[in-house]
Amino acid sequence: MRFLTGIFLGGLLLAQSPAELTKVFDQYLAAVKANDFKKVTAVYQSSVKEMVLSQYGSAGDQKEFLAALAEMAPDSYEAPTATPSEGQKVLLRVLGKKKVPPAIRKEQKLPPVVQMPMVIEVAQEGGEWRMGPPSFGDSPPAKEPQRPKDGGADRLQRRRLHGIRRAHPAH
């Protein structure tokens, strides 16, 4: 029975179109642009909201938090896609676009607009979609860093040796 319930709930989550899920992201971007701390936290998932409220209690901290969000928030985005995640969560993937200020563009030789893949975890809470903090890149941030069993060093060394052997076969 749990299996069938899981399939049914997963189907309901998949039925949500990216357009439906981007509404919460649009609300977030509007709140960031308006510099409205209360509206930003209103669209967050409850666990994220609690964390943000506990870390940014003073008006000065909230102002710094909003300034950081504004600097990272895209000016626009496109190509939203949604894929199911763990439990009743959905990953919304978008391609964010941010205008580069002329001074930085000249100094760092960047194009006028940079593109940044973003992943936003969206979940239903109380019948409404809520989001986690956006992450940059093609995959969401790991819950816990995954450390290779051998610490990565042995595997890296094996790859180097394997590449050397292939490039220079023994006589």
Image: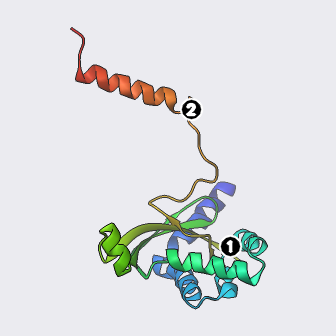
Q: Nearer the viewer, residue 116 or 63?
A: 63
Mark linked to residue 151: 2
Q: Residue at x 62, y 70 (%)?
A: 132
Q: Residue at x 64, y 82 (%)?
A: 40
Residue 43 appears in the rendering: no
Q: Quadrant of residue 116?
A: bottom left
Of tags 2 and 1, which is closer to the observer?
A: 2
Q: Is residue 148 above or below residue 49?
A: above
Asked if the residue under mark 1 is in contact with the one under mark 2, i.e. CB atoms within 8 Å, the reply is no
Q: Nearer the viewer, residue 22 or 53?
A: 53
Mark linked to residue 76: none
Q: Quadrant of the C terminus?
A: top left
Horizontally, is 42 left or right of 10 in the view? right
Q: Where's residue 86, x and y in %?
A: 61, 58
Q: Quadrant of residue 38?
A: bottom right
Crowding around mark 2 (Cα neighbors within 10 Å: few <14, some 14 to 19, many 20+) is few
Q: Is residue 25 above or below residue 92?
A: below
Q: Quadrant of the N terminus?
A: bottom right
Crowding around mark 1 (Cα neighbors within 10 Å: few <14, some 14 to 19, many 20+) is many
Q: Is residue 140 above or below residue 97?
A: above
Q: Where's residue 114, x and y in %?
A: 35, 72
Q: Mark 2: which amino acid?
A: Gly
Mark linked to residue 45: 1
Q: Where's residue 22, x and y in %?
A: 50, 80
Badge 2 marks a residue whose secondary structure is: loop
Badge 1 marks a residue whose secondary structure is: loop
Q: Quadrant of residue 77?
A: bottom left
